[in-house]
Amino acid sequence: MAGCKTYATERLSAFVDGELPAGEAAAVRAHASGCPDCTASIDGLRALVTNARALDVPEPPPTLWPSIEGELERRERFAWLKISPWRPFGIGALAGAVAVAVVLVALPAVYTRRNGPPAASPGAEVVAAAGAAATDPLLHEAEAEFAQAAAAYERSIEKLRALLAREEARWSPHERSRMAERIGRLDDAIARSRELARRSPGDSAGNEQLFAAYQEKIAFLAAAVHRGGEAGDWDKPGGGGQ
Amino acid sequence: MDNADAVMPVKPPTTPMLGATAQLTAVDGLRLGARAAADTKVHAPDNDAALVDAVRRGEAGSREALYHRFKRRVYALAVRIVGPIDAEEVAQEAFIRIFRGLTKFRGDAALATWIYRLAVNAALSHRTRRAAAAQPEAGNEIDTQPSADPPHGDAVLRGRIERALARLPVGYRTVIVLHDIEGLEHEEVAQILRCHVGTSKSQLHKARARLREMLAADGITAAALETG
């Protein structure tokens, strides 16, 4: 760095940008003409700006748009909960609708059992209730929305898997095996969450867990695709997956 | 995340872009840096206002067109503020905010300035969350140990500049990224950072001085900067 302390680097930077008042700029110019240190500083600042402007522009990974699109789609699919008259109740309203449906179906069965044969078995009541729930329009709509969101995640995963397949050809058998193992674990998590969601139709918690599992898999695949041949980074922090 | 030692990605991606099959059709009408032109990859209205209208009307492909128009600027900003590892997450969050906020965009500022503002906010929020969850950021100190290898060639020099930039305090880094790298004017930087123009200028000059100091400590002289 320059040894001359007449002008601080900040002032020389302002001089380079033409921001100094005319008088001060003239003084700097006059001083620099006889000061190799300040001349070097000014030239270095100009070169720094030139180099900064020429820095590479990193290309976003190919997974960025699919992940944005998927996230927008996911949020928009659930936006109806925020604008519908059910908003104050949210998913709780769905649960309430299911409860009402169960009661409406179960009451006649109980009444029949008390007042005359033949009473339906408890198992049959559950089946009947489930059937009623499945025909409930509100619940049906919610389930359809969840299914569409899940399908959007599946499509994103398929795209990423196709991209990854190109990279996999370059990997060693060991790396392919590790990848298969990681994906297997993520798939297990998705399967468990899907089962949980299936058992509790209309319950957002199960579906949220399922979507979190999808997102985890997408993040992992995206990281793997982004790293290309650097397959060994999967297990490092920021490597996606677990 | 500790960004201090983060190395900026300089190699091209190894995989093709999804959905970017169309020709370059338009150049951003705004001045906002020479690197803007390469961002548009799908058929889209030439001017930003028409594109915003198309997105608001829900026209097919308009969102993706807007994404392609600004993706490199948003992503580059994210890389340089939060580092390459978190950049994708930040860029995703920035674009979510952009698309969700587009209905509220009144056109008081240029679209690109507004987008930069959301991107900077997303990056800074991310850093704040990370800082709260982890240890304080390290690496803002100047490395006084000169490198054993003198820099040679443009790529090496720019790599050194990127690394020094990553070690700057985030406020300095942000202003130098917006002004010197992205080529914005101080008026735009001030709008994005919600500060006075004078503050933008003084921060920039301090940032450059600090960067020069770091580079000098790394053995990069003014002459080396000039010759590349």
Image: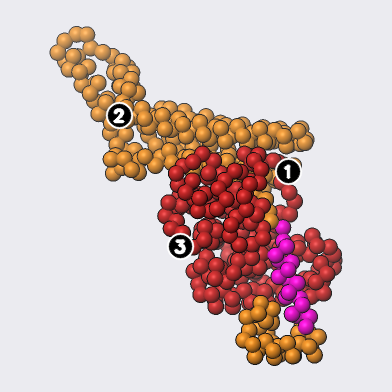
Is residue A125 shown above or below A238?
above
Image quadrant occupied by the N terminus of chain B = bottom right
Badge 2: chain ID? A
Badge 3: chain ID? B
Identify the image quadrant of residue A142: top left
Q: Is residue A147 left or right of residue A24?
A: left
Chain B drawn colour: red
Whether A196 is among the magenta residues is no
- Residue A59 location (% of width, % of height): 67, 50
Residue at image location 46% in from the left, 31% down from the top: A148
Q: Is mark 1 on a helix, strand or loop?
A: loop
Q: In this view, does B58 lie to the left or right of B91?
A: left
Residues drawn in magenta:
A39-56
The chain whose colour is orange is: A
Image quadrant occupied by the C terminus of chain B = bottom right
Closer to the eye: label 2 or 3? 3
C-alpha separation, residue under disc 1 versus residue under disc 2: 50 Å
Tell me, what colour scheme is on the image? by chain
Question: Which mark identifies residue B108?
Answer: 3
The crowding category of the residue bearing disc 1, from other C-alpha atoms within 10 Å (few below 14, some 14 to 19, many at least 20), is some
According to the picture, the residue beneath numbered tag 2 turns out to be A98
C-alpha separation, residue under disc 2 versus residue under disc 3: 49 Å
Question: How many numbered circles are shown?
Answer: 3
Is residue A153 shown above or below A56?
above
Identify the image quadrant of residue A124: top left
Mark 1 and 2 residues: CB-CB less than 8 Å, in contact? no
Label 2 sits on what residue type?
Val
According to the picture, the residue beneath numbered tag 1 turns out to be B14
C-alpha separation, residue under disc 3 versus residue under disc 1: 39 Å
Foreground pick, A116 / B139: B139
